[in-house]
Each structure stands twice: as C-alpha cells, then as structure tokens.
Image (cartoon, helix red, strand yellow):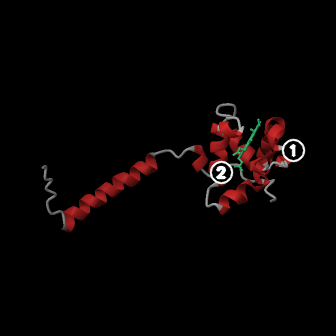
Amino acid sequence: MIKIKLGKQSGRIGNLKTGFCFSILSLSFLLMPPTYAEKLNPFEGNPAAIERGKSIFQGVCVRCHGINGVTPFKIRDLRRLNKKYKKWNKDPDKIFFETITNGRAAKGMPAFTDQYTDEEKWKIKTYLNTIQTL
Ligand code: HEC
C-alpha cells in the first residue's frame, strides 16, 4: 500500500501555497478567451444590426420559423425564445449560439456552422430580441 505523506502545511506556508494555487487558477480563467456565445451581445439595440439580422432571418430562417418568427409550431416559434430559457435558468444567447452553430439534426434544425460569422449570428440574435413578444 502506498502511503502519501502530506506533511503539515498548516500555518502561513500552507496558506501561501493555497493562495498561490488559487491565483494561478483564476489567472488561467482570465487568460482563457470566452467563446463568443459567452460574451455580451455587442449589437444590442443597434438599428443597423437589427436590419442585417432581420434580412438574414427573412431570407433563410423564415422557411421554417415563419415571417417574424411566427409559426403555429410552438417549438419553432421564436417569439418566446428569451422568456422560455430565462424561465428555465438558461442563457438564451448561449442556447441560440449552440442551436444555430450546431443545429439540432434529429429535430430538423440545420447547422449553420460556418455560413455566418459570429458577428452575423449576434445580429440575427439582436433582431430576434426585437420580436420577443410571447
Ligand atoms: C429546415 C428548417 C429550418 C431552418 C431553415 C431553420 N430552422 Fe431553426 N429550427 C428548426 C426546427 C425544426 C427547430 C426546433 C428544434 C427542436 O424541436 O428542438 C428549430 C429551432 C431553432 C431554435 C431554438 C428554438 C428553441 O426554442 O429552442 C433557434 C434559436 C433557431 N431554430 C434559429 C434559427 C435561425 C436563426 C435560422 C436561420 C439562420 C434557422 N433557425 C433556420 C428548423 C429550421
């Protein structure tokens, strides 16, 4: 049996070591760039972004999600996106990014992995934020 001798690290040295580990840990979190979905929407309320997002939506997404996100299929109706996920304690922006990037193949939502830049995806989300009426 291997016995690991931990030694007594109480007192100042132990605290210093723990403190050092924590600072390295927090530093690595700071240096890790957040994925785009974890950032705050850089275009919130920006009229030009809303226009661009709307035009992508009405050109591509409209086929399945309906004009202005209105469709009789409840799960595809995007007017309740924010409220629904907030109610479930989830971040609607993050869900949006995951869904548009990876799709939900089994459910019929295509993946738009590289079709749009992250900025364009934010613009679509900015537009969707203007139609959250349910
Ligand atoms: C071919 C049809 C189709 C197209 C085109 C499509 N979607 Fe979807 N989308 C779906 C379906 C079906 C679902 C529901 C998936 C499910 O049941 O979870 C969905 C779900 C979503 C959801 C999640 C809704 C929720 O409440 O969880 C978002 C967000 C979304 N789509 C955005 C878009 C955007 C933005 C576009 C255009 C770039 C787009 N979709 C294009 C079919 C489509």
CB atoms of marks 2 and 1 within 8 Å: no
**Quadrant of image for the C terminus:** bottom right
Q: Quadrant of ligand 1?
A: top right
Quarter of the rendering containing residue 13: bottom left
Q: Is residue 116 above or below residue 53?
A: above
Query: Residue 67: which numbered mark, if any?
Result: 1
Q: Which residue appears farthest toward the top when viewing the image?
A: 115
Q: Nearer the viewer, mark 2 or mark 1?
A: 1
Determine the residue positioned at 28% across, 60% down: 18
Specify whether 134 is left or right of 97: right
Determine the residue positioned at 63% across, 38% down: 102
Specify whether 129 is left or right of 8: right
Q: Is residue 12 above or below residue 107?
A: below
Q: Which residue appears farthest toward the bottom when viewing the image?
A: 11
Secondary structure under the numbered disc 2 in the rendered image: helix
Give x and y (percent) for residue 32.
46, 45
Q: Three-letter amino acid code at disc 2?
A: Asp
Q: Would residue 46 be visible to someone looking at this image?
A: no
Give x and y (percent) for residue 118.
65, 39
Query: Residue 93: which numbered mark, if any?
Result: 2
